[in-house]
Image: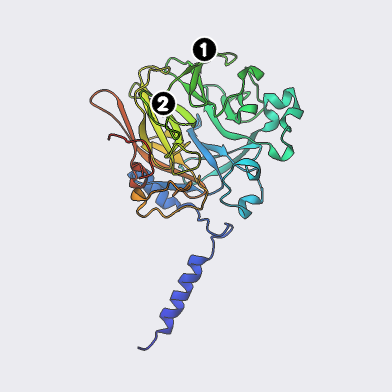
Amino acid sequence: MKRNPSARIVLLFLLAVLTVPAAGLPPGVVPAQPKSEILAGLKSHDRALYVKEGWIRDPYIVLGPDDYYYLTGTTPNPGDPREQSDPYNVGLWKTSIVGSKVQVWRSRDLATWDYVGVPFTLEDTAHFRANPASIDRDGPDQRRIWAPEIHWTGDRWALVHCPKGVASLALSAGPELKGPWTHPMGLNLGARHDPSLFKDDDGTWYLLWENTLIAPLSRDFTRFTAEAVRIDPAGTRPGPNGTAISRIGHEGATMAKVFGKYVHFGTAWSTDLPRKGSYNLYYCTAAKPTGPFGPRRFAGRFLGHGTPFQTRDGKWWCTAFFNGNVPPVPSAGIESRDLRAEAQTINQRGTTIVPLEVRQLPTGDVSIRAKDPRYASPGPDEVQQFQF
């Protein structure tokens, strides 16, 4: 058979293009989707959208008072070369590239992101101001800021973050997302892992932390106005050591009010074992923010520590990110693939948003579920059996 030299050249060109990393990205890391695809997906609300590349964990998106979407999360310090040399750093322990600064981006359309800068650093915490030496107890290279969230209070920004040893509840001086920051509770905030804020319809703010305690705050954020209570889901499930457990997860707890119900979100590995399986999002509902809450239900696979949020048109989405011990696995056939041997995800490095179906049931309760089939169902590695 006669060979076609032109076809061979085209084939070699395609192979070269497909094997060369995108400009400026480490090998294996793919760029975010084109703007046209993101905008089309925002309208169709039927598939996950990879909206921004860049090493990040716990991405948090909120619509600000200026009609921009703001994005922050756990990141390396700006310019850290390990973001290139160690692109899938799991973000844990002494080899972590998690930095000591809060970075923020903003976007009008969730497709094009502008860098806002670094409005908050470890040096802005009440702990550093009270005793700078305490921050370096594990060595200067072990400084960390994890899981920052920013919340608009009506006239200023509130920022919370962990780890619990240096956790903050800080307020900006005014409507701009920048310092100087004040700490209305000071060191009385205490050690709070994964703190999150929730504002009720009557204006009361609540702090959630661990997995999960909740307590109301005074209007000036200077104190708790009641004792903290646990808000575990009703019922139990088999724990990894054979003992029944009732907790919703182990981290990443948030709250939203939907159709008059309080929705408590929590994060856990599908196996309830550390870094085994998929990193998932679960929820339960109640008539009051302090409960009692109904049974634990499944919101989405690979959505652990995601932020459920609404776009301007009222559609619900949830942020997602790479969290695994190996690079992203292929998504084809993922619904039936057992991942229990290792921490694995289909999410690319960066920020992905996944559409949620949020509806009110005839009973008045709320149902929340990822719409993209790759995220919508628990995998074979899920230890809890859910009724849908």
Residue 47 point in image, percent of width and height: 36, 46
Relative image position of residue 225 (x, y in whole percent) = 53, 10
As rendered, which of 96 and 275 lies closer to the eye? 275
Report which quarter residue 240 is drawn in: top left
Which mark sits nearer the N-terminus, 2 or 1? 1
Label 1: state its secondary structure.
loop
Q: Nearer the viewer, residue 384 or 190?
A: 384
| Residue sitting at x 42%, y 23% | 232
Kindly identify which residue carries mark 1. Answer: 227
Image quadrant of residue 383? top left
Drawn side of residue 282 relative to residue 20, left or right: left
Q: Is residue 50 visible?
A: yes
- Identity of the amino acid at label 2? Ser
Q: Residue furthest front?
A: 242
Q: Decide: is 281 above or below 33.
A: above
Q: Secondary structure at mark 2?
A: loop
Badge 1: how crowded within 10 Å, few (<14), some, or many (20+)?
few
**Which residue: 39% across, 16% down?**
288
For the residue marked with disc 1, what is the amino acid?
Glu
Vertical relation: 288 (above or below) 383: above
Find the residue positioned furthest to the top: 225
Q: Residue at x 45, y 33 (%)?
A: 241
| Residue where numbered disc 2 is placed | 246
Residue 369 is left or right of residue 191, and the answer is: left
Does residue 119 appear to the left or right of 296 in the view shown? right
In the image, 271 versus 240, the foreground residue is: 240
Spatial CA span between label 2 and label 1:
21 Å
Quarter of the N terminus within the rendering: bottom left
Q: In this view of the protein, can residue 311 be seen by the observer?
A: no
Q: Position of residue 71 (x, y in %)?
A: 52, 38
Query: In the image, which is nearer the foreground, mark 2 or mark 1?
Result: 2
